[in-house]
Image: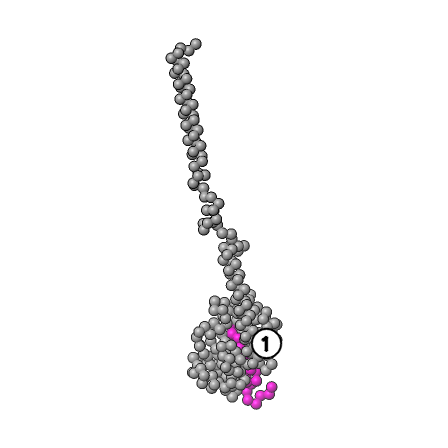
Amino acid sequence: MLKPGTARRTVAAVMTGAAVLLLLSSCGTAVHRQPNAGNVPNGANMQGTNAVQPLATDGTNAATSTARRKNAQSDKHLHRQFLDRVHQAARQGRMVNAADFVVGKTLIDEVHRQWGKPNRSEGGYDYYYPGMMKGSIAFGVGRGDIIKEIRIADTALDPVKDGIKVKVSEVKSALGKPDSVRRVGRQKRLIYTLGEYKLLFDYNPTASQNPELESISVFSPKAAKPMGAGR
């Protein structure tokens, strides 16, 4: 049997131990709950500007990929419109960016009168560089000083002015199968016959699987023939 003093000390020790255990339990609960209180972002924060955006199949940001597809579709549409204008002008012996002149009819002197002295003359062609992203325009001189060809090149073949020129596949899609295809030096030429005129598209076949055009011409075979030659 415990003495009265010993019993009191035992009871006091038990109560002290219980208090310590209760205090430790409370501290542990607080430590465990603290991250949920402020360190873990909630659903609203996860949807903010730092949220990871989905990727497209090519690894780019999905929004960027969609914008690129829309731009590509817009380019194709504008290229098609440009080729339609070229085709309509060529049916009249004219070329875009130089519609005041007609192959087989206009004398080269008329070009000089309107546009002044050419920037360069070489190989029977007078070259002009009008600026304003119109590229280069060359006038081939035929018999009797009549214009036999009007050729556009460089940035004139980039109607959107975004660094992408019209491609061979786009010509075939817009105008159909050419009447003939010829090799001209290192180039190949798509030829479309439009009555007394011919519409020519020159490109480098080794540039790519679907090369960009290097020049477009409207041509008069009649004006190209020497005087006295038959048809």
Residue 74, horizontal then vertical, whole percent:
53, 65
Say which residue label 1 marks: 192
Residue farthest toward the bottom in the current orientation of the protein: 228
Residue 184 in view, yes or no = no
Q: How many marks?
A: 1
Residue closer to the observer: 83 or 63:
63
What span is colored magenta in the figure? 214-231
Kindly state the secondary structure of the residue where label 1 is placed: strand
Q: How would you rate the neighbour count of disc 1 (Cα within 10 Å): few for under 14, some for 14-19, many for 20 or more?
A: many
Indicate whether residue 112 is drawn in magenta: no
Question: What amino acid does circle 1 point to?
Answer: Tyr
Residue drawn where x is 42% and y is 11% of the image: 2
Residue drawn where x is 43% and y is 25% of the image: 21
Residue 189, horizontal then vertical, whole percent:
56, 74
Residue drawn where x is 55% and y is 89% of the image: 227
Residue closer to the observer: 196 or 84:
84
Question: With 39 as the anchor, is 178 left or right in this view?
Answer: right
Indicate whether residue 217 is drawn in magenta: yes
Residue 108, horizontal then vertical, whole percent:
48, 85
Toward which corner of the image does residue 176 lie, by quadrant?
A: bottom right
Residue closer to the observer: 194 or 11:
11
Quadrant into which the N terminus falls: top left
Residue 44 in view, yes or no = yes
Residue 68, horizontal then vertical, whole percent:
51, 61
Q: How is the image coloured?
A: one colour
Residue drawn where x is 59% and y is 76% of the image: 192
Please tell me whether residue 77 is drawn above or below residue 94 in the rendered image: above
Quadrant into which the C terminus falls: bottom right
